[in-house]
Image (cartoon, rainbow, N blue to C red):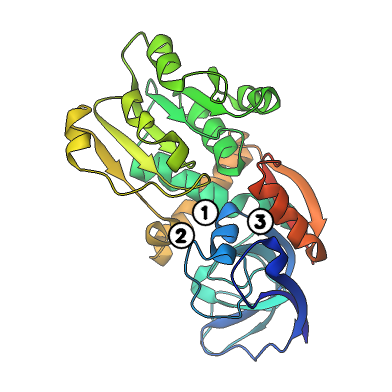
Amino acid sequence: MTKAVRVHELGGPEVMRIEDIELARPERSQVRVRNHAIGVNFIDTYFRSGAYPAPALPFTPGNEAAGEVVEVGKGVKDFKIGDRVAYVATLGAYAEERLVESSRLVKLPKAISYESAAAILLKGLTAQYLLRRTFKLKAGDVILIHAAAGGVGLVLTQWAKALGATVIATVGSPEKAKLAKKAGAKHVILYRDEDFVARVKDITKGQLCDVVYDGVGKDTFPASLDCIKPLGLFVSFGSASGPIEAFSMNLLSAKGSLFATRPSLHTYTAKREDLDKGARDLFRAISSGAVDIPLRATYPLDDAVNVHRALEGRQTTGAVVLLP
């Protein structure tokens, strides 16, 4: 038996319950991982609430964790018992142990702790594809990052600064403004107190941004489009305030022949070689000091309900990790 968080009905944080579950033996290509640290991400709340559809009920939330291999299935050649690993996989991470497809695992360098890996892998891989592939950021680019003091936002800000971009950040409080500034944002906008479009126009002297990275969604759209220069890119990668509603494609034309995309980590890491390349790039950025692991707090797995409440209440900054 292994302890896990289970969701039997969709709803608020209170629908999560701690239960003992029976875990099957790993099938071909699967690995049994004993989690030492579990990453908490806003996407976890989407599955719990029903905003994103879970395959079935009941289910165990969580897509990210780090731990050690305790059993391998037939056909697994790249991993052995005792290996330190981290993963971003399908639902099931909020548990002491779980089965993971070996194709979703990455080996964890000795210099990175389990807690740090659980805090950074999903957010770091997300930042990696956003900066390196969705928009190939280069020195001199001017970018806007919404929710820059959040888990992904802090990584994006640090890495973009290291790549030579000018980062304009929006945050919700003076405390978060300090975090974004420390992470490398040249300009910080308090979006609750200021008109962020007017501030972007003022900061850039009317030249606007090459790209907007938006993990907020409904509250910042369509105003974000007014921050982008002609032929620029709008990247929507999250919906913390709710999803962006359907809009006319003609809006992109009217705002300057803009491009818009809604990428996902799953697509960008579907190929094993892309996952490995992204992880290597991330671990290099950490080792070089370009990216600091944004671990802010750890909580016991039993406290998952309160952690989700804080997350949805915008009361967290950086990364939060659960410990089984």
Is the N terminus in the top left, top right, bottom left or bottom right quadrant?
bottom right
Mark 3, mark 2: which one is toward the viewer?
A: 3
Q: Are marks 3 and 2 in contact (CB under 8 Å)?
A: no
Tell me the amino acid under the disc marked 3.
Val
Horizontally, is 167 left or right of 226 in the view? Answer: right
Instruction: Name the residue at 49% across, 41% down.
Output: 216
Could you tell me residue 311's position as x and y percent? 67, 48
Kindly report the distance in space between the C-alpha atoms of the residues bearing marks 3 and 2: 20 Å
Q: How crowded is mark 1: few (under 14 residues within 10 Å), some or many (20 or more)?
A: many
Report the residue marked by disc 3: 40
In the drawing, what numbered circle is on residue 275? 2
Tell me the amino acid under the disc marked 2.
Leu
Horizontally, is 46 left or right of 202 in the view? Answer: right
Report the residue marked by disc 1: 279
Horizontally, is 51 left or right of 67 in the view? Answer: left
Nearest to the observer: residue 41 or residue 51 = 51
Asked if residue 163 is positioned above or below residue 322 in the image, the reply reads above
Q: Are marks 1 and 2 in contact (CB under 8 Å)?
A: yes
> Which quadrant of the structure image shows residue 85?
bottom right
Kindly report the distance in space between the C-alpha atoms of the residues bearing marks 1 and 2: 6 Å
Could you tell me residue 314's position as x and y percent? 65, 41
